[in-house]
Image (tube, grey):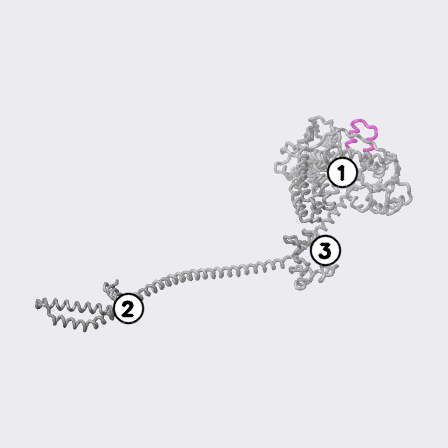
Amino acid sequence: MQSPVHPQIRALSHWIRKWGKLRSAISCLFIICCFAVVVSIAAGIVSNNQIDWPLVKGSLLFAVVLGPIFIAFIFYLVLHLDAALSYLEDSAHQERLLNESMQDNIRQLNFEIEERKKAFQAKRRAIDELRREIAERKRAQTELDEQALLIRSMVDSSPDLFYYRDETGRFASCNKMFEMIMGKTASELIGRFPAEIFASDSAQSAILTEQKDVSKLRTELILDVEFRKDNGQLLWLEVRKVPFYDKQGRYIGLLGFGRDITSRKLAEQALEKAYQDKGKFIATLSHELRTPLNGIVGLTRRLLQSELDQQQHAWANTIFSSAETLGNIFNDIIDLDKIDRQDLDIVHQTISFSQFVSDIANFAELLCQQKGLAFNLEIKSNIDYYLILDPTRLRQVLWNLINNAVKFTAKGSISLSCDLDTNTPADLKFTITDTGIGIEPEEQSRIFDMYYKAQDGRRMSIVGSGIGLSVSKALVEAMSGSIELTSTVGEGSCFNLQIPTTITTKPQETVVSCPELTILLIEDVPLNADIAIALLEQRGHEVLHAETGEDALALLETEDDLDLVLLDMQLPDMCGADIAKFIRSEAHLKNLPIIVLSANVRKAEQQLAGIKIDGALAKPLNTSKLDNKLAQLFSPSAVKFSQKKTEQIQNKSNEPQILNKHIIADYINSLGKDSVKRSALLFNQLYPGYMNKMLEAAVQHQADELKEVAHKLKGAAATIGLNWVQQQAARLEKEAVNWQGIERQIADFQQKIEQHVAALEAYIEQY
């Protein structure tokens, strides 16, 4: 707190400085002198009641003498006190300023300390984070190294070979198996071209493919490669080559994988040999069985041409139908894998339904009579219709079911019920009922399985292979039908058969004339030869017969007026293919027509691959097929008639031919509507992908890619009968690409495909 004296001293000092020391001293001296005079006067008056002038003079003198000293002392003291006060005030002010500055500095220092603490803490956190990141990276690197080592160990320990080639074709990596197969270490392979290491004809080069060939494919390539090791051991490798491309479509490398498939190849070869052996056995067996069958067919045909009463004619006709059906069954026996693939051929024909039912009834009645069973035929509708179906397959199914019914019925009756639903589409229903032993409920679900025989103890004594019902079901499904079973143990069984069909009119028989021919028949079985000669001579042809290949060659060399050769494939001294080769090698015989006779037409055509033949007929000979074949070869009117019928079928509708209805109908009749629907659905799912690839190829102006996709689309469209789509895809595939407007064309093409797919689905539904 400031002292009250300080202002007075400051004021006095201020006055002294303002007036000057001299003037201030004179003024002070005057005041002192006045004060001394006044005091002395007052003292004299007080003491003496009068003025004491000596006292006054003495006081004045004293004031004059001592006043300046006193004033000087007071001035000195005041000025120094003022200076000291000023200094103290300045010091206090400076101290305040210093304190304020120090406080500001302290605050700034404290702030900086806090900031440094925070920075230090942040630094520590960053260091800790960096340490953790370094630790994580070390751990990740360790794990990556371990995984790389594991993957490398797995790749090296894999029994499959692996290699990688860069975009230049040089080896970039491989595994131990590849080193072992190639006979080179990785250091000898990596960085080098295959041509620098292996000769073009070496066993190792067969595993490698030049990358320019693979890169053009733009898809993986799978090859089965035969590789013989240095020790002579033969290996089969399945080599898969996968080209890699970057986002710009640039080829960047090739991955190759190889797997040892030697055991599989050996198994396939063994299986193929087994199939060949089985085929040879079945073909030989069928050939031997056909010898008496040909006699049955031929003699029955001649018997039908003789004078018989109505019942005898019906019996003979049943024998003839049975023999023909048995011949067709032999064709299936020769090619058993068709049953495994459910790929049985369905051949639709126009038949008289009443005659068909009569043949089935005659067969069933004969079977029942042999066992003393009653046979009942129930016809629930008018059967005086002509139907389009496969009579051989349907007859085979019905005979199998009737034969099973008789086999498992000791007494009672067998009933056959037939019903024809004439609505569109027509539906044919058969019911075969017996009073036999029946089938256990748990056995009914497996009764149609291949080689399955009921294990109930009552059927074990019945001889059978267990394939009859399975084959019957396969045939029914191939005809787009269904078969169901209901059975009660001890009361009998009932099989319900339903087959779709088409009602048509009686076929108009077209008689085609054929000129008289000189025919060389090469057949080693006398009975077959007699029947064939009788059929041909009945039609006015002259027949020369050769029983052996040697006799046939002699006749071919000596006879100059031969018009046709009927060639059996199995002869005692040579194969029919050798005779066909001889005929085509001789200048004067190379244009001589050859028709092959064989129990296995498909196998015969395979044996004659590369040799020109003019047709093939199955044995026993079918007269109508024989007449048609001769007419096609030697009667122009027959050819014109056939062409005219084909044109009528193709032009029977004025609608644009966007669908190949003939193919679609054939597929529906053969595979069933559901299967064709699935194919149409699959195409509907696939074609957008094809269109996208075509559009992408059009944008990038890749003509080869565009044509490749168009080729795939063409094949897919042809498979399901999209005629117009197939034609347009074929045009895109073959013609030069005009890039101007191609994207718009593809977009319009896709819209058309959508319309045609909808038309296809509607046609399948309405069929």
Question: From what the image shows, is residue 574 above or below residue 432?
Answer: below
> Which amino acid does the dot numbered 2 rest on?
Ala
Mark number for residue 137?
Answer: none
Q: Residue 162's x, y, as percent? A: 65, 57
Q: Is residue 170 visible?
A: yes
Residue at 67% in and 49% down: 700
Cα gap from disc 3 to disc 2, whole angstroms: 122 Å
Q: Quadrant of the C terminus?
A: top right
- Disc 3 is placed on an element classified as strand
Instruction: Give the residue number, with chain letter if any, for mark 1.
Output: 328
Region rendered in magenta: 299-318
Q: Residue 757's x, y, as percent? A: 67, 38
The reply to whether the magenta stretch includes residue 305 is yes
Cα gap from disc 3 to disc 1, whole angstroms: 41 Å
Q: Residue 745's x, y, as percent? A: 69, 42
> Which amino acid does the dot numbered 1 rest on?
Asn
Residue at 83% in and 28% down: 307
Quick check: 179 left or right of 647? left
Q: Nearer the viewer, residue 442 or 732?
A: 732
Mark number for residue 83?
Answer: 2
Instruction: Give the residue number, with chain letter if any, for mark 3.
Output: 226
**Sequence order check, earlier mark of 3 and 1:** 3
- Rate crowding at label 2 as few (under 14), some (14 to 19) or many (20 or more) other CA atoms within 10 Å: some
Q: Nearer the viewer, residue 280 or 705?
A: 705
Q: Is residue 414 visible?
A: no
Q: Nearer the viewer, residue 385 or 465?
A: 385
**Sequence order check, earlier mark of 3 and 2:** 2
- Disc 1 is placed on an element classified as helix
Which quadrant of the structure image shows residue 179? bottom right
Q: Nearer the viewer, residue 127 or 548?
A: 127
Question: From what the image shows, is residue 333 above or below residue 89?
Answer: above
Residue at 63% in and 38% down: 445
